[in-house]
Amino acid sequence: MNRRIVLPLVVFLAGALALAAAAILTFSPTRQGGGTGTASVGGPFTLTTQDGKPLSDTDLKGSPFLVFFGFTHCPDVCPTKLFEISEALRAAGEGDKAKKLKALFVTVDPERDTPEALKSYLGSFDPRIVGLTGDRAAVDAVIKAYRAYAKKVPLKDGDYTMDHTALVYLMGKDGSFIGAFNIEQPPAQAAAEWLRHT
């Protein structure tokens, strides 16, 4: 084979392998205490909704929920994911099981994403999506608990944007991490998968 083809191919495969290994290590279950496997993603939190009310992890017990980290100034990934989540919720319908479904949009930019900003932004999406914000320390604690990534990136004009994890997390009725949720599948399939956990 031509060396100009082989070297980039080897570099690409090594990078893909490293990413796969990182994903396995990040999202593999851990053993704690006496032996049952518990996910090392998620945990206790209390943040403020777009309506200015506190919401904690205990308020979500009994309902499977999705968690997505983003920000209201996000140009493409966030509105796309929120649209896909909205479509899955619409496909789930209005039945008793569907009413138990919840989705959380946790800001990674609490300095700009006040409850009012979240309320205005989320008005374009399904009302079952709850926007969450808080002070920087509280938001950072949730980002860390979910093993998410967020970093402020300065722009040339003096403004900034945010780099962040684009993963949608599926959490069980007991708040445990089930896995990364494929929200890009057709809405009916996404809804069916989500409803299986009610």
Image (cartoon, rainbow, N blue to C red):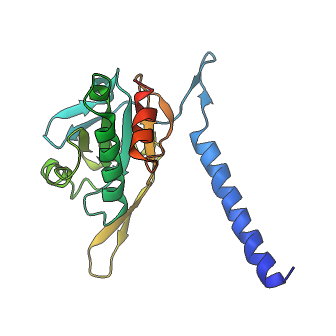
Q: Residue furthest right?
A: 1
Which quarter of the figure has residue 34? top right
Q: Residue at x 34, y 57 (%)?
A: 80
The x and y percentages for residue 183 are 43, 47
The x and y percentages for residue 141 are 38, 42
Which of the two residues, 185 or 53, is positioned nearer the viewer here? 185
Which of the two residues, 138 or 117, is positioned nearer the viewer here? 117
149 lies left or right of 28: left
Quadrant the C terminus occupies? top left
83 lies left or right of 127: right
Q: Residue at x 53, y 34 (%)?
A: 40
Q: Residue at x 20, y 40 (%)?
A: 49
The x and y percentages for residue 190 are 43, 40
The correct choice, above or below, for 144 with respect to 102 in the image is: below
Quadrant the N terminus occupies? bottom right
The number of callouts visible is 0
Q: Is residue 140 visible?
A: no
Which of the two residues, 31 or 68, is positioned nearer the viewer here? 68
Q: Residue at x 27, y 81 (%)?
A: 157
174 lies left or right of 118: right
Q: Is residue 116 visible?
A: yes
Which quarter of the figure has residue 170? top left
The x and y percentages for residue 95 are 27, 25
